[in-house]
Image (cartoon, grey):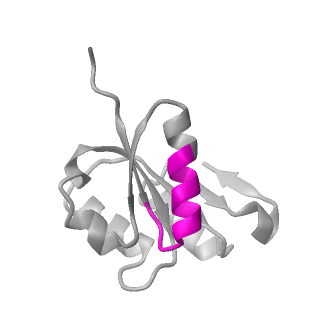
Amino acid sequence: MPRVQLISIVDDDDALRNSLDDLIRSIGFRTQGFPSAEAFLSSNQARDTACLILDVRMPGMNGLELQRQMVAANWRIPIIFITSHADDDARARALEAGAVAFCTNRSARKNYSMR
């Protein structure tokens, strides 16, 4: 039987990270949450990740910096960015670097922007 794919969630907002974890598990995926980019990079699960859900703004290394490191290391994991801070520049940079989606929190702008 094939192993269920792992979706990693990197977000400093505990409530959002836990909600996404519950939602994604409810549709049959394995999940692992991380409170920071640094925690994700140092984990054993990072290399097993099939898809990464990533916050843009976090203390320490932000999501765009993590994406840059992953691209530089030729680490090809689909990335879905999430943010409550609508920022057209960050959206453009994330998508140009290969993100598969850049979603803004509905309460921030009531808009989802996908590639």
Residue lying at the far bottom of the rendered structure: 60
Regarding residue 51, the answer to whether it shows in the image is yes
Asked whether residue 11 is drawn in magenta, I would say: yes
Give the image location of residue 88, x and y in percent: 65, 72
Identity of the residue drawn at 54% across and 31% down: 27
**Which x, y percent locates residue 98?**
43, 54
Q: Residue furthest right?
A: 110
Residue 49 drawn in magenta? no
Tell me which corner region of the image, top left, top right, bottom left or bottom right, holds residue 70: bottom left
Nearer to the camera, 15 or 104: 15
Is 30 situated left or right of 56 in this image?
left
**Going 43% across and 85% down the picture, which residue do you hit?**
59
At x 37%, y 73%, the residue is: 36
Q: Is residue 90 above or below residue 32?
A: below
Residue displayed at 58% across by 66% down? 15
Q: State the residue in front, 56 or 35.
A: 35
Quadrant including the N terminus: top left
